[in-house]
Image: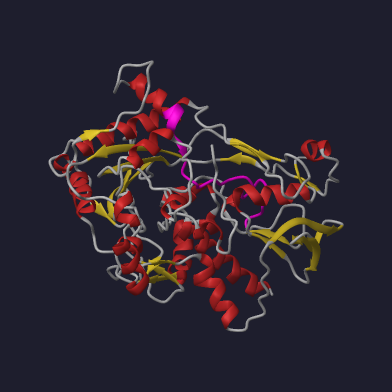
Amino acid sequence: MTMPLGKVLGGSSSIGDMIYGRGNVADFASWGASWSWENLLPYFLKTERALDIDSSQYHSTEGNLPVSRGEKECELSSAFSEAAQELGLKHVDYTAKEQLGVSQSLFTMMGGERWSAARSFLEPALNRRYKVHMTTSSVASKILFSGNRAIQVVFNQDGVNVAVRARKEIILTGGAIETPKLLMLSGIGPADELEKFKVPVVVDLPVGKGLKDPLKLWLRYKSDKEISVTRDKLTSAKSFLEYYFSKTGIWSETLQSQTTVFLNTKNDGSSRPDVNINMLRAVALPNQAEILGVKYELEDKFNAELYDSNSEGFTFVASLLHPASEGQVRLRSTGIHDPPLIDPQYLTREEDIDTLVAAVKYVQKLASTSALSPYIREAVAYPDGQHAPNTDEYWRSVIRHYAFTAGHPSGTCSIGKVVNDDLTVKGAEGLRIVDSSVFPSTVSGDYTGVLYGIAEKVVEEMKKTD
């Protein structure tokens, strides 16, 4: 399975689906009092520049990060929202305190363009002549210590090693995969693992353990209506010219519909959802390389056949928000360009499969509503020759074979185990982590807004102690 990593300015905010999220109030119960959702809310607001969202105590127009509804609500999105309400879900703002229900999706977009962390925060800092120095084509290779104090970062730029000395502290933002790799290469991690590679141990910590990576499953439906994003629409001269001259048309839109649903499939009275359901306005996802005229063979033959058919339709995306299955990240070697060993231990806990089966059944209920059924000609069945179609055994097999990463890994350097409450690394001085690796529990939905809020809070605390 491929795990995408944002090795570009802006990190994964430059490659992801642009959905803005803040998690659920209950997500932060295990994080410690200073990291409660209520304590983070002021920092969520500080970063946000809401463009077309109804004003409330939960939204701000003063920040650097554009947050919008994306584009004019499409026909499919309206039908999706009506279908959810037909099943009894109430309309909520999923970025506010109450998340269970159906909601308008929010995106980090403005003017038909993506607004990444680099564009929203880094570029303004560079343009205002702050003391910010940026290097590209660079890979951090090691942190050097004097005793247990981090004093230098070594990085490789175009084959040349460069060392930069830190006068105050070093902050890591490599994410849940790359941050533990860099720490272990630098001598912070499980002593037994480091000794295998003859890396001198600076601090013995459970770095890399506790990996949680939510999974998602596509459920596709073909339609007789012209409602979706298809190959021909994307590659037409009209689409190109609309975007080139006015940043409008199909290229200015996200494939996501503007509706999202958060569910508690267990119905146990908890306000914390265990499933998120989104909709893609395509029955098969076009490959960007092929759109640009590059011959590229899709890894998923099943998806490729749908794409080649230029089919009209849509795809429900059912996501498992809080996997019980837990994996780890370990060193493969001491080579800086070698990827680490990533073992997510997907679906090793049966309750994860149970939750996704429940999500599938809810999607089928949505598809059978009077609001959505007129848009459906047929459901696209997954190939499985071992079980009768549409049985629990069939769906459990499909989930095991076709579910894939939602792209939200976290937990490999978590609060309390690897970092202190202020996100400084335990047992080390002058070293702090500000990325999803510090999450002690998974966040409900996309965690873009959570990361920006955490970063703002850390900056404020650093200024107080400066």
Quadrant of image for the C terminus: bottom right
In the rendered image, residue 40 lying in the magenta stretch gets the answer no
Q: Is residue 389 above or below residue 281?
A: above
In the rendered image, residue 406 lying in the magenta stretch gets the answer yes
Q: Is residue 329 above or below residue 105?
A: above
Range of the magenta residues? Answer: 399-421
**Residue 222 in the image: x percent, y percent?**
24, 39
- Identify the image's colour scheme: rainbow, by chain, secondary structure or one colour: secondary structure
The residue at the point 31 percent across, 16 percent down is 388
The prevailing secondary structure element of the residues shown in magenta is loop
Number of labelled discs?
0
Horizontally, residue 173 falls left or right of residue 156, namely: left
Quadrant of image for the N terminus: top right
**Residue 130 in the image: x percent, y percent?**
63, 81
Residue 351 appears in the picture as rendered: no
Horizontally, residue 464 falls left or right of residue 378, namely: right
* Residue placed furthest toward the bottom: 129
Q: Is residue 120 above or below residue 100?
A: below
The part of the image, by quadrant, that contains residue 353 is top left
Residue 40 appears in the picture as rendered: yes
**Residue 172 in the image: x percent, y percent?**
67, 59
The residue at the point 82 percent across, 39 percent down is 197
Horizontally, residue 47 falls left or right of residue 329, namely: left
